[in-house]
Amino acid sequence: MTETVEVYWSFRSPYSYLVTPDLLRLRDDYDVDVDMRIVYPIAIRDPSLVFDPANRDKSRYIVRDSRRRAEFLGMPFLMPARPDPIVQDNATMAVAEEQPYIHRLSALGVEAQRRGKGLELVAEVSALIFGGTDGWDQGDHLKDAVARAGLDLPELEAAITDGDQLEEVALNQEALSAAGHWGVPTMVLQGEPFFGQDRIDTLRWRLDQLSVV
């Protein structure tokens, strides 16, 4: 019987980007559906968990560790600042009220999942954001990435204009909390959470126990 792996994932998380190749391989290797459950970055949900202007140790470590992990995995990597999906003051760590990028990206991710291409879309778009593409939101960068995922950007944009995709993001965040975690990426199999892109091997071990091949 096909199992469902729920993946709680955000467009601003470097670790979410780093897990996407493993998720694609997981889907190829096992009899699983990968259900991408898009959530807002922690900077939107609860910035106090990571961003403290008086103590930058957490944010500095995330930058250092994600760069190192990308090098280990052989993946291109730059922290996003061209533009950053989150509009935030780097000096004060204050998050702006207006967030044009992350709302759009999250809605596109939800709509892509509804069309059965959620994993493909997040893989292609996150590769733009973290792979070093300057102005990833300009020109045809996003359109071409969406096309590589097997979707059409104008169609997705039309669907999210008056849609309820952002309501689903809120529901996904509630589901992440109900699953027993707060961070991304978190993979959930039969109610059991596996947090972090380095827990794919543990998730595979559990799938092997369930004989999901």
Image: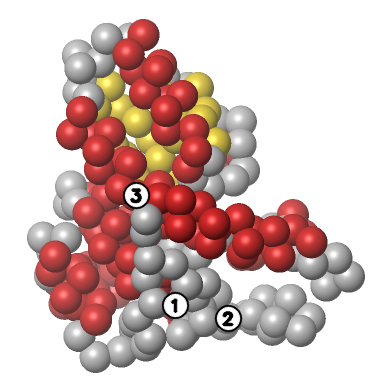
Query: Which residue appears at 16% of the width and 60% of the height?
Result: 149
Task: Relative to 3, say whether 155 is above or below.
Answer: below
Kindly tell me whether residue 4 is visible in this rendering: yes
- Where disc 2 sits, the SS reads loop
Mark 1 residue element: helix
Cβ atoms under marks 2 and 1 closer than 8 Å: yes
The disc label shown at residue 20, or none? 3
Residue on which the image places disc 2 = 87
* Residue at the image point whose x is 22% and y is 54% from the top: 120
Image quadrant of residue 53? bottom right
Q: Name the amino acid type tagged 3.
A: Thr
Q: Is residue 172 above or below residue 95?
A: above
* SS category of the residue bearing label 3: helix
- Tell me the amino acid under the disc marked 2: Val
Q: Is residue 98 left or right of residue 21?
A: right
To which residue does mark 1 refer?
101
Three-letter amino acid code of the residue under disc 1 = Tyr
Q: Earlier in the sequence, mark 2 or mark 1?
A: 2
| Residue 184 at x, y percent in the picture | 53, 47
Q: CA distance from mark 3 to mark 2?
A: 24 Å
